[in-house]
Image (tube, helix red, strand yellow):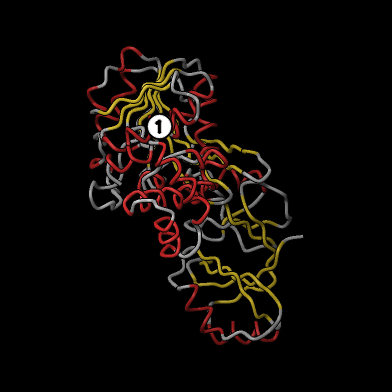
Amino acid sequence: MELEQFAALRTAEGSAALDAAARVAGGDPLAAAAALRSAGVPAGLAAAALTQAELRRRATGKFGPAASRMFYTRAGLEQATRQVVADRRARRLRAAGASTLADLGCGLGADALAAARTGIRVYAVEADPLTAALAEANAQAAGLADLVTVECGDATAFDVTGVDAVFCDPARRRAGTGRRIFDPNSYSPSWDFVTGLAERVPRTVVKVAPGIDHALIPAGAEAEWVSVDGDLVEAALWCGELAELPRRATVVKERLPAAYQLTGTGTREAPVGPVRRFVYDPDPAVVRAHLVAELAADLDATLADPTIAYLYADTAQPTPYARCLEVTDMLPFSLKRLRALLRERRVGRVEILKRGSALEPERLRRDLRLTGDQPASLVLTRVAAAPTVLVCRPAA
């Protein structure tokens, strides 16, 4: 979408086109486009309206009912913080005393809006003119324009001396291609600028990729990994006076709704022992935060291999930080033996989990050629460095 197309969507004619697009979107795109053109909507405006209708439909999972009033680009939506995560971060900032916030690299404005909803005055900066215009429109749609000012400009040039908190979400995709950037030194703004913010503003939060190397975490910063309903969605560095402890894994359950936090040093090592009756598959936030040892202590569990994050225990305990399965069989991996065992058990549907295995789950599923009517879970892993498969069922 170009700025001119967005401007057209903001007119009365554009608003009508958006309403019409919302009624026909979700089905055959060619039929939807034809329906809008037959209603007299110009082709260019119809295309822009249908794109927004489709993006709004997709955005519902991130923003809930508010998604239907917001504006998006495809890349912006992919990178936007989920509302449940942004709201949690904003509440923590507010509780820490933040009253004015610079949102450097605000994107579509998800974090800026969350902060404003808590009463924080937000100064948002975005380098891309279209994205900045969308963020401003989203603040207006949310009724927060009096608390959110959006500036199109260079985040590194913003004067942070007038705020008491900074949130920075550096671009982690290459402009023009949308390809992910895995090296923080290639972020925009640069990694040196981002990490230097903590020396200039007492309350600094930096959103980073969940796969960030722990060696890059600044000394004294708190690193938090967040998962939502089992999906690892982001990591954040809490710097300066916001840092409370070295590592935190936050596990959000949207359907409850609830959030659980496991904390620790990130340097402990879990004890190693044999495979036992129950296997726990830790939440990815726990694994990435290097808090498996802390979880093992809570569950009285051990690892079967020091490099594989499956935990084993004699009892099943409810925990928000891991899924628990009961091990019915353990065997060295052999396709022939596994196929025979599953046929004997009349297994026809398998869920395949893996850590430390090079096997491709879908290929294994085909090779098993299952025909029974019973379900099972297969855990492909290593035990004492040997390829192993665990046949499991849900823990009672």
Q: What element carries label 1?
A: helix
* Residue name at image x 60 percent, y 71 percent: 378
Q: In which quarter of the image is the C terminus?
A: bottom right
- Picture quadrant where residue 12 is located: top left
Q: Is residue 337 left or right of residue 208?
A: right
Q: Name the residue under label 1.
A: 137
The residue depicted at 46 percent of the width and 23 percent of the height is: 242
Please determine whether, in this image, residue 46 is positioned above or below residue 68: below
Please state which of residues 194 and 256 is positioned toward the viewer in this rendering: 256
Instruction: Pinpoint residue 109: horizontal percent, then vertical percent.
Output: 41, 33
**Could you say which is closer to the camera, residue 396 or residue 47?**
47
Give the quarter of the image for residue 29. bottom left
* Foreground residue among 294 and 210: 210
Instruction: Indicate the position of residue 286 as horizontal and vertical percent values.
Output: 53, 46
Q: Which residue is drawn at 44% across and 40% down?
A: 15
Answer with the quarter of the image where residue 134 lies. top left
Q: Which residue lies furthest to the top in this view?
A: 162
Q: What residue type is labelled 1?
A: Ala
Residue found 41% across the figure and 28% down from its top: 205
